Image (tube, rainbow, N blue to C red):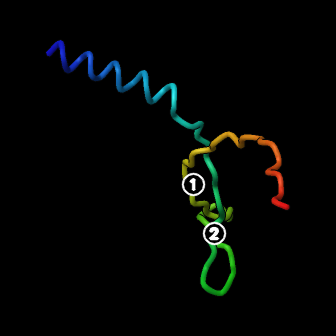
């Protein structure tokens, strides 16, 4: 049991340190003919997904070979 708890703590610590930030993205549903799908209230239905957002690293320009 102690090994399980230690493994769980190590797993949580590493995923928090190396895990990417998440962002919720919603896109309107569209029918095959390009019209939006409406719900009962008349608003367009949306498909929402949670995606990972990674930091973009800036680097130096690679020198060209002569």
Q: Secondary structure at mark 1?
A: strand
Q: Nearer the viewer, residue 1 or 47?
A: 1
> Which label sits on residue 6?
none
Give left or right: position of 18 versus 6: right
Of all residues shown, which one is farthest toward the bottom?
33
Q: Quadrant of residue 29?
A: bottom right
Residue drawn where x is 69% and y is 82% of the image = 34
Of all residues shown, which one is farthest toward the front?
66
Residue drawn where x is 83% and y is 48% of the image = 61
Mark 2 residue crowding within 10 angstroms, few (<14) / some (14–19) / many (20+): some
Give left or right: position of 33 versus 47: right
Residue 31 percent across, percent down from the top left: 61, 80
Q: How many marks?
A: 2
Of all residues shown, which one is farthest toward the top?
2
Q: Nearer the viewer, residue 24 or 62?
A: 62
Residue 26 percent across, percent down from the top left: 64, 55
The residue pinned by badge 2 equals 38
Q: CA distance from mark 1 to mark 2?
A: 15 Å
Residue 12 percent across, percent down from the top left: 39, 24
Give left or right: position of 5 versus 12: left
The image shows residue 8, relative to residue 46, as above or below, that is above
Which quadrant: the N terminus?
A: top left
Q: Secondary structure at mark 2?
A: loop
Mark 1 residue crowding within 10 angstroms, few (<14) / some (14–19) / many (20+): few
Residue drawn where x is 59% and y is 64% of the image = 40
Task: Select label 1 or label 2 by which is in front.
Answer: 1
Q: Nearer the viewer, residue 33 or 39?
A: 33
The image shows residue 13, relative to residue 30, as above or below, that is above
Is there a contact, CB below 8 Å, between mark 1 and mark 2?
no
The residue pinned by badge 1 equals 48
Q: Nearer the viewer, residue 64 or 41?
A: 64
Residue drawn where x is 77% and y is 41% of the image = 58
């Amino acid at each position: 049991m102690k090994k399980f708890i230690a493994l769980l703590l190590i797993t949580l610590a590493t995923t928090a340190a190396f895990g990417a930030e998440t962002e919720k993205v919603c896109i309107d549903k569209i029918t095959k003919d390009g019209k939006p799908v409406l719900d009962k209230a008349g608003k367009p239905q949306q498909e929402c997904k949670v995606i990972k957002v990674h930091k973009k690293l800036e680097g130096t320009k690679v020198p060209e070979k002569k």
